[in-house]
Image (spheres, grey):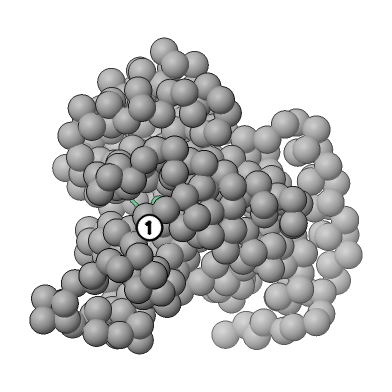
Amino acid sequence: MTRIHEHDHTPHSVDFLRALPKCEHHLHIEGSLSPALLFRLAAHNAITLPSHAVDVAYASIEALEARYRSFTSLDDFLDYYNRASAVLITRADFEALAYEYMKKAHADGIVHAEISFDLQTHTARGVSIDDVVHGLNDGLNKGRTDFGISFRLIMCILRHLPVSSSVGHMHLAKPFFDAGLIFGLGMCSTEKSQPPTKFRPVFDLAREFGIGHLTAHAGEEGPADYVRQALEELGVHRIDHGVRSLEEDEVVDMLVKRETLLTVCPLSNVCLQVKPRLEDVPLRELLERGVRFSLNSDDPAYFGGYLLENYVQVQRAFDFAPSDWRTIVANGIEGSWMPDEQKEKLIERLDAVIGACK
Ligand code: HPA
Ligand SMILES: [Zn+2]
C-alpha cells in the first residue's frame, strides 16, 4: 500500500492533497451530525432517543459509532440518518451544524462548498422553514467570513415521500429561492423503485420558478437508466453519485457530450456497500472515458471521514499522478455553481499547487 507522508509535496502527501483548491458539491448537512453531537443536542433539547430496548445502537455514543461502521445498504443508513434529525430544533441548532461543517471544510482545504439540506424531514416535526434556512445561512455566512469559503445552499426533495409533499415544499420554499437564500434544487433519499420520471412535476415547477441549478442523486443503487432519466426528463445539470452510469455506454456518451459533472462519494460508496472496496469505485475508468467527476464526502459523520480523508484514501487506492489530480480538481472547479471569474482564480491557484508538486 502507498504510504501517505505528512510534510512533503509529492502527490502522496497529505499536504499536497490539502493544498489543492477543493470544491465540495455533495454534502448533506444532516450527514455531518455526529453521534457525539446527536447525544449532546438530544440532552440540550430534551429529545428522547430510541430506547436501547428498541435499538441497542443508541446505548451510547460508542455503540452508535460502531453501528455506523456496519451499514448494509442506502436504506439501512437512511433509517439512522432520518431519525437523527429529530434533535435539530432551533435556528441556533442549524447555525451550529453549518458552522461546524465550515470549520472542518477549512481544515481540509475546501475553498467552495455546495451544501444540501432536507427540508421535508424538518417540517414534518414542526420546525419552520425560516429556522432551517436562516439558521443554515447564519452558520454558512459566518464560515465564509471566518474562513473565506464560498457556498451555495441546495434544497433536496425526498424520494421516500409522495410527489405532492415535494411540490408543496417547493411552494413553501419559493420565497427563499427568490431571495437567494436557497440556490439550487436536488433530489435524494431511497433510490430503488423510485424512478426519476416520477418526480418530473417537481423539476418542471423548478423551471417555472426560474431555479436554474438542478441536480439529482441517480445511479447510486439505482440503474444507469435512472441517470438517463434525470438528465433527459428532469433536465438536471449535475448528477449526484452516478457511479452506475458506466453500465450503459449510451449514458456514458450522454455524460461526456453534455460535460455533466458526477459528484462521486468514494467513502460513502464503500460504507453503503455500493462498491466492495475503494478500488472498485470506477474513478480511473471515468477519467479514461472523459466523464467529469468531483470527489465528495456525502455524509461524513456516518461514512468515516470528511473530504480530505476521501482524497487521502483515494490516493492510497489509485496512486494518481499530479496530472490526474489536476483534471479531477479542475473539473470540480468548472462544474461548480460559482462565477467564471472565481473559477479562473481557482484554476490559477490549482496550477500553482500542481507546479510545486515534485
Ligand atoms: O447518499 C445518499 N443517497 C441518497 N440519499 C441520501 N441522503 C443522504 N445521503 C444520501
Ligand atoms: Zn448524497
Q: In which quarter of the image is residue 33?
A: bottom left
Q: In this view, does 158 lie to the left or right of 296?
A: left
Quarter placement of the C terminus: bottom right
Residue found at the very far top of the displayed protein: 208
What percent of the width, then of the height, locates residue 340?
75, 31
What percent of the width, then of the height, locates residue 236?
44, 29
Q: In which quarter of the image is residue 110?
A: bottom right
Depth order, front residue of 69/55? 55
Q: Decide if residue 257 is in sight here.
A: no
Depth order, front residue of 20/160? 160
Q: Is residue 193 left or right of residue 257?
A: left
Q: Is residue 322 above or below residue 187?
A: below
The amino acid on which the numbered mark 1 sits, given as a three-letter code, is Leu
Local secondary structure at mark 1: loop
Q: Decide if residue 51 is in sight here.
A: yes
Residue in the picture at 53% in, 54% down: 95
Q: Is residue 224 above or below residue 148?
A: above
Near mark 1 (Cα within 10 A), the count class, few <14, some 14-19 or many ≥20, is: many
What percent of the width, then of the height, locates residue 49?
24, 71
The residue tagged 1 is: 88
What percent of the width, then of the height, locates residue 357?
84, 67
Residue in the picture at 79% in, 45% down: 347
Quarter placement of the N terminus: bottom right
Residue in the picture at 57% in, 71% down: 309
Depth order, front residue of 281/110? 110
Q: Is residue 147 above or below residue 211?
A: below
- Give the number of callouts: 1
Q: In this view, does 195 lie to the left or right of 313?
A: left
Residue in the picture at 79% in, 46% down: 346
Q: In this view, does 255 lie above or below 78?
A: above
